[in-house]
Amino acid sequence: MAIVDTGSVHAAASRLLVAQPSVSQTLRRLERELGTELFQRTGRRLVLTPAGRALIQPARDLIRALEVARSAVESAEGVMSGRLTISSMPSQAVHPLPALIGRFRRAHPAVSVGISTARTPAEVCQAVEDGSADVGLLAVSNGPLRDATVRIQPLYVQGYVIVARDPSGLPPGQGPVRVDELTDLDLVVGQPGTGMRRVADSIPSSTGCHVVAQVEHREALLPLVLAGLGVAIVADSWRAMALAAGLTVREVTTDETLHVSLVVPLSFVGPAAQRFCTMAANAGIDNQ
């Protein structure tokens, strides 16, 4: 697997902290046992042959099964340890992931947690499917995720809020606002295709609102609002962080919703991942 992930015997040996001839000999021995070549050289990289591609998923499943078996033995002895790797989309890494990890670590301090960020639901699912993550956390717009390669565990549904440094430009009151009530606002928006952007784009042009900045990374939205560039529409998961920064936050009335879910492998879910998912499901009502 190290050769697949790194693309060369030399890089695989470096990752595994072994001599390069050892990796080469292991590969040749496996190819002799299977009676076929698993890699072909393309330039300076090794590329999987059709036989190699057919072997990759069973090999990943076997590695995952061994890790699950090891964790199950440790759990049966009363101590849950090891490492839990989570792949999360950026907004969910802001909320609810920190709270979920904090709750899990307080219950299981011997388990270390690794977090990787994925830009799309497909990347999260791929990380879980190929074994580079034990659990995935993601959100999709206007309906739960459907993906046959992983198991989906819905957590909750959330809406959107508008955040502003100066509340005077927003409609009077403290309650939700409709998009047609927003007038003459400078908008800081994210990339097209996101739920946040669709809500911003649904503001009628007759209101006089207009886009003054478009950012590639949504993490830049709140700092730009704090700098006074304009207002932004963000997922409700950003509410606590925006309030902590001193921004005004109002709910936006819209048909757009975000469905937040966990994803786990179809098989070989380890004790730590199982426990994390159970705790997340029980905490779901607190994250809405």
Image: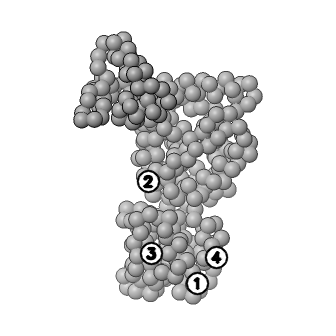
Tell me the residue that label 4 is attached to: 246
User: Distance between the Cα atoms at labels 1 and 2?
Assistant: 31 Å
- Under circle 4, the secondary element is loop
User: Distance between the Cα atoms at labels 4 and 2?
Assistant: 28 Å
Three-letter code, disc 2: Arg
Question: Looking at the image, is 26 positioned above or below residue 109?
Answer: above
Of mark 4 and mark 2, the one earlier in the sequence is: 2
Tell me the residue that label 1 is attached to: 167
Three-letter code, disc 4: Gly
Q: Is residue 203 left or right of residue 42?
A: right
User: Distance between the Cα atoms at labels 1 and 4?
Assistant: 11 Å
Disc 1, disc 4: CB below 8 Å? no
Tell me the residue that label 2 is attached to: 119
Tell me the residue that label 3 is attached to: 188
Q: How many other residues sit within 10 Å of disc 2, few (<14), some (14-19) or many (≥20)?
A: some
Q: How many other residues sit within 10 Å of disc 3, few (<14), some (14-19) or many (≥20)?
A: many
User: Distance between the Cα atoms at labels 3 and 2?
Assistant: 20 Å
Q: Position of residue 106 (x, y in %)?
A: 74, 45
Mark nearer the viewer, 3 or 1? 3
- Under circle 2, the secondary element is loop
Residue at the spot x=61%, y=55% of the render? 96
Of mark 3 and mark 1, the one earlier in the sequence is: 1
Three-letter code, disc 1: Pro
